[in-house]
Amino acid sequence: MDDFLATKSIGNGRNLHIASLAKHTIEDCGAAHMGYEGYFVFEASDLPDRSGITIFGKAASYEAALALADIIAA
């Protein structure tokens, strides 16, 4: 994980993030088809039965990532 634009706790040991991700992280999540550049929307969990990250999607642009960051910060 490199450049975080936003982080929000969503409870139960889970956090929602908008950030860039390392190539190996993207590959480990099975999301290489999304490419390696840009900002991803993903959940990180510390729960024992669900630890790790789940990538939900990718922002269409840097500006879109900033808009999403503003939304989750509100």
Image (spheres, rainbow, N blue to C red):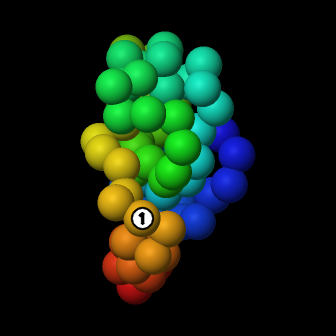
Q: Is residue 6 left or right of residue 63?
A: right
Residue 37 drawn at (x, y percent):
54, 43
Does 9 appear above or below 43?
Answer: below
Residue 41 visible, this angle = yes
Residue sitting at x 40%, y 44%: 42
* Residue at the extreme left of the image, as rendered: 56
Give the position of the N terminus as an image quadrant: top right
Residue that label 1 marks: 61
Residue sitting at x 68%, y 54%: 3
Give the position of the C terminus as an image quadrant: bottom left
Number of residue marks: 1
Which of the pair 41/50 is nearer the observer? 41
Residue sitting at x 37%, y 17%: 30
Residue 11 visible, this angle = no
Q: Is residue 20 left or right of residue 60?
A: right
Does 64 appear above or below 16?
Answer: below
Q: Amino acid at mark 1?
A: Ser
Q: Residues within 10 Å of mark 1 (few under 14, many from 20)?
A: few
Residue sitting at x 30%, y 45%: 57
* Residue at the extreme right of the image, as rendered: 2
User: Element at badge 1?
Assistant: loop
Which of the pair 9/54 is nearer the observer? 54
Task: Quadrant for residue 68, please give it.
Answer: bottom left
Residue 36 drawn at (x, y percent):
52, 35
Residue 43 drawn at (x, y percent):
40, 42
